Image (spheres, grey):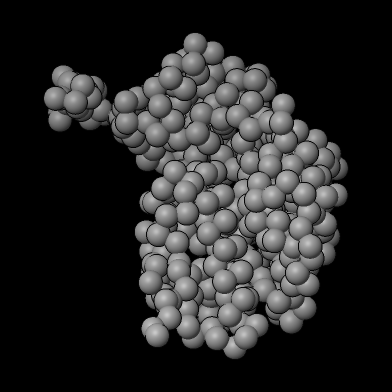
Amino acid sequence: MEAMNFNFLCSSPPAPQYRSVAVIGAGPSGLAAAGYLSSLGYQVEVYDKLPKPGGLMLFGIPSSRIPADRIDRGVRNMSKQFGVVFHQNAKICCSAPMHDEEGDHFTADVIGLRDLVTRFDAIMIATGAWKSKTLGIEGEELPGVFTSLRFLFPIRAAHYNTERVHLPEIAGKTVAVIGAGHSAVDAVAEAIRLGASTVHHLYRRTKLDAPCGTHEIDVLQELGATWHEYTTPLRILGESHVEAIEVRQFEAGPTDEHGRCVPLPDSERTVTLPVDVVITALGEISTPPFAEELGLGSVRKGDVRWLHMTAIDNVFVAGDALTGPSKIGKAIYSGLRAARSLTNWLDLHAVGRESEFKDNERINDEAYRFPGGQFRNRPQMPKRKD
């Protein structure tokens, strides 16, 4: 199986350019940016709080989807052939409190963003999305309630540090998983693998509406999961631990013109399911360092002088840290796009001509646009008027 080729721009190391860039985050966007920049001969150093590079590709997604060995060999190639330096277990201090995100407990070194800004020619922030969304219902704080990330992360991370990471106790228990994206699918599959006696899979719409696709749900049902559609959680019950989940359900009625069942309007009922564990898979929230100070809201809207640049001239941002959670391909594309913008800025900055770059490309729709990996609509140097 081939290694991931983060240095696809060239087959051998280029001549050094004597420019230094720090990349914060070793997920798909950060690794793509590091590969692009090191392929140009830049000295790149990557900082990440986890014990190994890969981000959620390694610590959140099963190896059956993305083999860990491919990531590892791609990273080693960047390090050995292209001189990229990786600083693991290093977190760049930010406005969020420590241990507020998954993976923070691996941190051994805390580094100030300002220190990097003064040491490097440019900074790329690609910290991803490591804080989970919550339901906001009664009982969500009870022991036995997990977000999908808090449930799945220890299962992957236990391979790297068994002292700091403890696997969730699932064997023989009844589990409810809420959601129908790939994180929910992975949580259901892991709960079954860890020996849960019963797994209820709850979704507010139908199988045909599920983001993960009907095939994934069919496979889980074959493995023994019980599928519940038109089901919305109302509250989680229990005294000192989860004991049940109360949900609102509708019965499925006839299909519409698209082949989807519609709920019967008078079929609403409240059901209480006895469960020991509840896993919510609602997605994640990005928590980049100093989001307000860097003006990331303006960057997302496209109200910037330079594509992907923050309020600090030599600090750029890419991937889920900018757009919010997205697919791997979008994160990689964003990292490449931001890295190219960074190099354009450094080129003009070196000769004091930054103002010549026109912001003729906006970023406000990047979360929804992924043009096949092609660098379409790329920023151009203005043509000379002779």
Instruction: Write the residue at 40% across / 85% down.
Output: 386
Q: Is residue 271 left or right of residue 276?
A: left
Which residue is nearer to you in this view: 369 or 89? 369
Quarter of the image that includes the N terminus: top right
Instruction: Write the residue at 66% across / 46% down.
Output: 8
Instruction: Write the residue at 38% across / 64% down.
Output: 364
Which residue is nearer to you in this view: 293 or 95? 293
Extreme residue toward the bottom, this view = 352
Q: Is residue 249 left or right of residue 347?
A: left
Q: Position of residue 179 (x, y in %)?
A: 44, 35
Q: Position of residue 52 (x, y in %)?
A: 78, 47
Visible residue check, residue 281: yes
Q: Is residue 25 positioned above or below 311 on the image?
A: above
Q: Is residue 249 left or right of residue 242?
A: left
Q: Is residue 136 positioned above or below 248 on the image?
A: below
The answer to which quarter of the image holds residue 109 is bottom right
Extreme residue toward the top, this view = 222
The answer to which quarter of the image holds residue 114 is bottom right
Which residue is nearer to you in this view: 97 or 342? 342
Q: Position of residue 316 (x, y in %)?
A: 58, 70
Visible residue check, residue 150: no
Instruction: Write the residue at 77% across / 78% down.
Output: 119
Q: Position of residue 325 (x, y in %)?
A: 49, 50
